[in-house]
Image (cartoon, grey):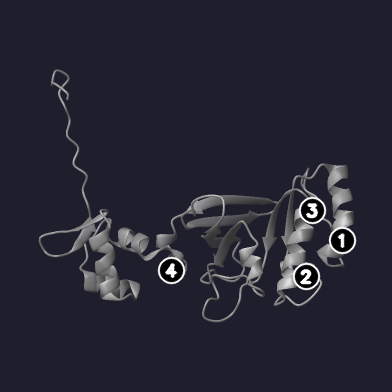
Amino acid sequence: MPHGLHYVRCSQPLVTEVGRMQKWMLEYGCRFCVVDSIAFALNGPPESAEVAAGFFRSLRTLNVGSLSLAHQTKGENAESKPFGSAFYSNGARSVWHVKRNDDEGAGSSTVELALSHRKSNTGQRLSTRGIRLDFAGTTTTVDTFDLAGSADLATALPIWQRVKSLVAHTPMTVPQLASELDARPDSIARIVRRMDLFRKDASDRVCLAETTLVALEPDEERF
């Protein structure tokens, strides 16, 4: 175990283990904890609002920063909410959704993830980003990568970012973009119309807007 990182094996719900956790954190000076995962730290069904509230009350008595991992719900809004009560999302200050690249080959030592910021109570939501983990022996390397280049993970990006990536080097028409992105043409057209990032060329193809810079000579009068 790396220096300063402690693993505490728990066999009871957090509401029961919280006293032991408090003593552990005081003894070792811990300032952050990771709960993996929420479902196993509960003292009742995940669908219960009271169980969710009890989990957060216990977590906050630890008085440290925390990261709680949760499985995602299945169904229509599968990628936006943790499994169980809505209060797991409502009670969190910040919520991230993590999607793994399903195109990785068996036995690969590299894992690619798309991180999407779904909620923030303390500031602006951050942009979706790609994280690559490379496992080599006892060393794990963490790096960033462009999600637009991943066939499986690019769908995690907002559609305007995917349009930007496609037209950065090759202008495309709205129907071509809609076909490439499996999106509605009117949605693409609305994005292009509303965002100053894009413009259309003489052939009605979408491309990135050019920024014109005006250079002033040193002796030119400035107002």
As helix, strand or loop, the secondary structure at mark 2 comes to helix
Q: Residues within 10 Å of mark 2 (few under 14, many from 20)?
A: some
Q: Earlier in the sequence, mark 3 or mark 1?
A: 1
As helix, strand or loop, the secondary structure at mark 1 comes to helix
Q: Residue furthest left?
A: 202
Mark 4–mark 1 Cα distance, whole angstroms, equals 40 Å
Instruction: Give me the residue at 76% from left, 46% from top.
Output: 2
Numbered disc in front, either 1 or 2:
1
Mark 1–mark 2 Cα distance, whole angstroms, equals 12 Å
Circles 2 and 3 in contact, beta carbons < 8 Å:
no
Circles 3 and 1 in contact, beta carbons < 8 Å:
no
Mark 2–mark 3 Cα distance, whole angstroms, equals 19 Å
What percent of the width, then of the height, locates residue 72? Answer: 61, 73
Q: Which residue is mark 2?
A: 40
Q: Is residue 158 left or right of residue 119?
A: left
What percent of the width, then of the height, locates residue 156? Answer: 46, 66
As helix, strand or loop, the secondary structure at mark 4 comes to helix
Mark 3–mark 1 Cα distance, whole angstroms, equals 12 Å
Numbered disc in front, either 4 or 1:
1
> Which circle marks residue 155 in the picture?
4
Numbered disc in front, either 3 or 1:
3
Amino acid type of the residue that numbered disc 4 sits on in the rendered structure: Thr
Q: Which residue is mark 1?
A: 17
Numbered disc in front, either 2 or 4:
2
Q: Residues within 10 Å of mark 4 (few under 14, many from 20)?
A: some
- Snapshot quadrant of residue 204: bottom left
Q: Residues within 10 Å of mark 3 (few under 14, many from 20)?
A: few
- Snapshot quadrant of residue 36: bottom right
Instruction: Give me the residue at 26% from left, 74% from top.
Output: 185
Instruction: Give me the residue at 85% from left, 51% from top.
Output: 22
Q: Which residue is mark 3?
A: 61
Q: Residue furthest top?
A: 219
